[in-house]
Image (spheres, coloured by chain):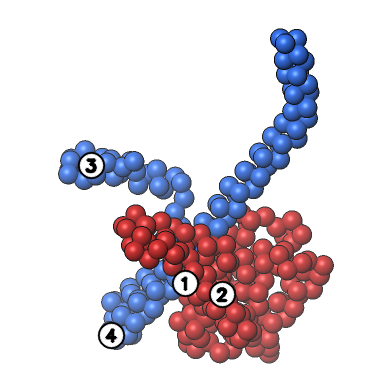
Chain colours: A blue, B red
Amino acid sequence: MGFVGVMAGSGLVALAAPIVTTAVPIAYSSVINIVSGINESAFVFGANIYQNLNNIRYTLGTGMSMYFNSNTANHINLQKWAEGTFNPTNSEKLLQFRDNYQSIQHYFHFLPEMP
Amino acid sequence: MMSEYVLLKNRLNELYFNCDGLDKKQLRNINFYSISNFVNAYDKLKGSKEKETVYNLLNSYFDEMKGEDLNSFSKDQSKELFFSYIVKIGQYYNYQLGFKGYMGINGAIFGGIVMDLILSIFGILVKLYFIPISTILLVLFTAAINHYFGRVNKLYGYRY
């Protein structure tokens, strides 16, 4: 009985080995594809939000600057602000934000802790 | 003396000539359709200062594309073009001519799922029998924008 069991086990291993060796790289590459697909979709969504925010900024700045005469400092500053764009965030800036938040949180304990 | 519009149109044609053999996806990588829509509507822009800014930005875009290998244009380069030119030029066209931002359906699905997750955290989605309302609405809205504004060439955005 034991001999039959060992034989059956080794037969199963012999059967499973090629399946595993082909399935693992396929599974790995599909996981990589899915992750990069999600990453790209997140960027597409974020890029749309970013450009809409900049459009709102331009509309607000230009609209508010119309309340002032064209040669006044307020008009010039608002127009300048409107024509600029928000700086895109990167991981370095997010880390910097985290550091700043934690240093503020050190003094104001009621602020929630960052995950 | 040639007008600015004709000069830009010539540069666009030059770029189009260099893009010979590129497929739709590769053209989207260099934001070709956005730039083409900007150049074609350039004459409708108002204000000399605004026109000058747009003209300079479009010219710098064409200068940058001159030395590039368009066949192997990476996604990172595409992102750089988006932040340096497309967003900045798009502000003027959005405000004056009503251009709309292009978003791929994959972005809409992602945004919808995120919003649906937020709704489910607040317990709103339970009351709606778990129908992913945000995803459905965002996908429909995005498809409508892409369809209608794409038809009248008033669309611009990342990888468009």
Mark 3 touches mark 1? (CB < 8 Å): no
Q: Nearer the viewer, residue A30 or A47?
A: A30
Identify the residue at horizontal 28%, vertical 77% (top origin).
A74
Quadrant of the rendered image containing residue B29 = bottom right
Which residue in the rendered view is the most extreme toward the top?
A2
Q: Nearer the viewer, mark 2 or mark 3?
A: 2
- Circle 2 packing at 10 Å, graded few (<14), some (14-19), many (20+), is some
Q: Give the residue type that dot 1 points to.
A: Leu
**Residue on which the image places disc 3:** A105
Q: CA distance from mark 2 to mark 3?
A: 43 Å
Numbered disc 1: what chain? B
Where residue B93 appears, x then y in whole percent? 51, 80
**Residue on which the image places disc 2:** B143
Q: CA distance from mark 3 to mark 4?
A: 40 Å
Q: Give the residue type that dot 2 points to.
A: Ala
Labels 2, 4: one chain: no
- Circle 1 packing at 10 Å, graded few (<14), some (14-19), many (20+), is some
Mark 3 residue element: helix
| The N terminus of chain A: image quadrant | top right
Identify the residue at horizontal 28%, vertical 85% (top origin).
A67
Question: Which mark identifies residue B137?
Answer: 1
| The C terminus of chain A: image quadrant | top left
Labels 4, 1: one chain: no
Question: Which mark identifies residue A67?
Answer: 4
- Circle 3 packing at 10 Å, graded few (<14), some (14-19), many (20+), is some
Identify the residue at horizontal 68%, vertical 90% (top origin).
B1
